[in-house]
Amino acid sequence: MPAAGGDHAGMTAAAGGTQAPGGTQAPCGVRAPDQAQEGGGLIVAVGSVDQAHLKYLELILGEVLDLPFRILDRPISADTAFDPVRRQWNAGKLLQVVDDLPASRGASRILGITEVDLFIPILTFVFGLAFLDARTALTSTHRLHPEFYGLPAAPDLVLRRLEKEALHEIGHTYGLKHCDDRGCVMHYSNTAEEVDLKDARYCPACEVRVRLG
Ligand SMILES: [Zn+2]
Ligand SMILES: [Zn+2]
């Protein structure tokens, strides 16, 4: 049985490398081939996604990262990443699909948003995955909804969690690893409740790295 997951990636190397167990200090994300780093950010809906979530992220990411984001005008399919045995979607495959999008050419940051349940082989689930020190990240809202845990719906709470997880995964694209500062958005979260405990901000040390691009 795979270990429980969280908001970090295990480490599937893009070129088919080995896996390392997850952990609070584990490097996060996977290496991507060198890509042109120019232009603004792109938000991509993967499958059916709440438009309010996309609009909110467009606003927040633009402000926090000081980078103009736009939303791709149509969703892309998550189908090729579906694993019929686990009945979940392979986050590494989906991340690569987003990164390979012709429409993303020239974007300096790409964030895929999906409502499907993501996994990597060594973990039961992940909230998201990112290419480390590259440009592409992926975040799922699936386990950010209180309803997933049998609790009443709370749309505002989902937005706050999504904001944190999007900033977390994008932080990995700036080369950030997990941060010991419990208030920092780069602090590792294994559960939705742990996501709630951290702030939607980078600590000063992480912020510097993001500002440097
Ligand atoms: Zn992480
Ligand atoms: Zn930090």
Image (tube, rainbow, N blue to C red):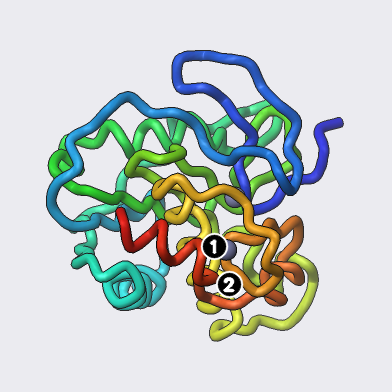
**Quarter of the image where one finds residue 101:** top left
Q: Which mark is residue 180?
A: none
Residue beneath the point at 19% across and 67% down: 68
Residue beneath the point at 63% across and 28% down: 84
**Where ligand 2 lies, by quadrant?**
bottom right
Residue 162's x, y, as percent?
52, 68
Q: Nearer the viewer, residue 10 or 102?
A: 10
Q: Residue furthest right?
A: 1
Q: Which mark is residue 161?
A: 2
Q: Amino acid at mark 1?
A: Glu
Q: Secondary structure at mark 2?
A: helix
Residue beneath the point at 32% across and 24% down: 33
Q: Which mark is residue 165?
A: 1
Residue 6's x, y, as percent?
69, 51
| Cα–Cα span, label 1 and label 2 | 6 Å
Residue beneath the point at 57% across and 25% down: 12
Q: Nearer the viewer, residue 55 or 166?
A: 166
Residue 136's x, y, as percent?
36, 43
Q: Residues within 10 Å of mark 2 (few under 14, many from 20)?
A: many
**Quarter of the image where one finds residue 120:** top right
Position of 49 compared to 181: left or right? left
Q: Are marks 1 and 2 in contact (CB under 8 Å)?
A: yes
Q: Quadrant of the N terminus?
A: top right
